[in-house]
Image (cartoon, coloured by chain):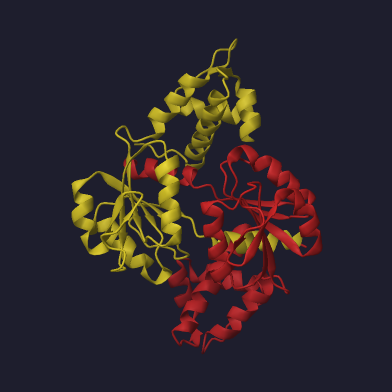
Chain colours: A yellow, B red
Amino acid sequence: MLKIPEKTIQRLIIYRKILNDLRYFGETNLFSTKLAKIAGYSPVQVRSDLMVIGYQGSPARGYDIDNLETSIGSFIDAPKGEGIAIVGVGKLGKSMLEYCYWKCPNLSSIELFDVDSKLIGTEVEGIKIHHIDDIEMILSQGNIRVAIITVPPENAQDVAGRLILAGIKGILNYTPVRLKVPEDVFVEEMDMIVPLEKVSFYARQS
Amino acid sequence: MLKIPEKTIQRLIIYRKILNDLRYFGETNLFSTKLAKIAGYSPVQVRSDLMVIGYQGSPARGYDIDNLETSIGSFIDAPKGEGIAIVGVGKLGKSMLEYCYWKCPNLSSIELFDVDSKLIGTEVEGIKIHHIDDIEMILSQGNIRVAIITVPPENAQDVAGRLILAGIKGILNYTPVRLKVPEDVFVEEMDMIVPLEKVSFYARQS
């Protein structure tokens, strides 16, 4: 499949969130100019992004919100829902779990992994924590291709390697380590210290 | 001041983390090739980034780890430490607080804000939660230029506006809203759903 630019995918996801909000407030239609204004992009950008998913509005009524939201969803989402593995069930891992549990619209399953013997076998939000040694066995049973890594930096590369062996193809990396992964694995860097220090630096320049 | 590219600042911050790790394990010197390998960039890139801060290694011994770490720090860090305001003390806000509290090396102070009357006046990690209506008063007393926004999306733009009025120049935005801010305010987007959906999408393509 032709690789669609990351920025396009990212914007489509943002459009969907906006449409979802608007629908919640009872709106049914909107024009590309309004969507563009809320999203902070140009109307040309919005229209060209929606062409990627083969969507065109009506010149008289603009976009049908419900319909456009569904179209973006069928393009972006896994048809049977997304399974996610969270590795590292510390404070950040738990906060991610709750976030996914309550806010990820297309979530089908979550598996939790850690190495701390005090945690193994206990439950968070009704989900049992497994030992990371069982990761291949457990992931082979399901359809989980996405993992969130919230382990200490010194374990990050090792954990990533084990996840990839277990079939993971997409990683949200909450550690500062630049993970080495095969070309077919997509990594999104989510470390908090780097952006925080970057923001602090630029805040001082102005 | 000449604006240094974000990517350069980001790489310098990553180098520092690596140097810090290596020092912890007792290393004293390293060559640009090794730093490049760990960081995942080219040696040319590493050397050119360090030229930005006026740092050059010795051909025989490479970089002095301690010295280079300090040099990056004096370039990146606020001389008197960084003050941070966290707005929205829900689960994510608390998790960010603990993260900063324990892991931000250059932190000088944290202030917490919320609107929930049940939270106002209570403490987390010994830090009192203030009402957001007091934000201008409290921030005017200190030297806080950086804020982390972890409020519900519908309040994000309003909160950002109040923070900017109170003198904030850098924002870590944990909401999916694209904040509208003046040119001299630096915003780093930290929303979790957009990257998670992006990773899920690409994980399915491979």
Give the residue displayed 47% in from the left and 25% down from the top: A69
Check the picture and name the quadrant holding the C terminus of chain B. top left
Give the residue displayed 64% in from the left and 24% down from the top: A33
**Vertical placement of residue B159 versus A54, above or below:** below
In the current view of this chain or complex, which residue is farthest to the top? A60
**Vertical placement of residue A159 versus A124, above or below:** below
The image position of residue A65, as x and y in percent, is: 52, 21
Residue placed most toward the observer, B2 or A171: A171
- Locate residue B73 relative to residue B36 in the image: left or right: right
- Locate residue B157 relative to residue B23 in the image: left or right: right
The image position of residue A44, as x and y in percent, is: 61, 27
The image position of residue A39, as x and y in percent, is: 61, 34
- Can you see residue B180? no
**Vertical placement of residue B183 versus A163, above or below:** above
Residue placed most toward the observer, A77 or B80: B80
Q: How many numbered badges does the structure rendering display? A: 0
Rendering quarter of residue B96? bottom right
- Can you see residue A101? yes
Give the residue displayed 54% in from the left and 86% down from the top: B59
Rendering quarter of residue B153? top right
Residue placed most toward the observer, B164 or B132: B132
Residue placed most toward the observer, A146 or B163: B163
Check the picture and name the quadrant holding the N terminus of chain B. bottom right
The image position of residue B112, as x and y in percent, is: 65, 58
**Vertical placement of residue A91 versus B195, above or below:** below
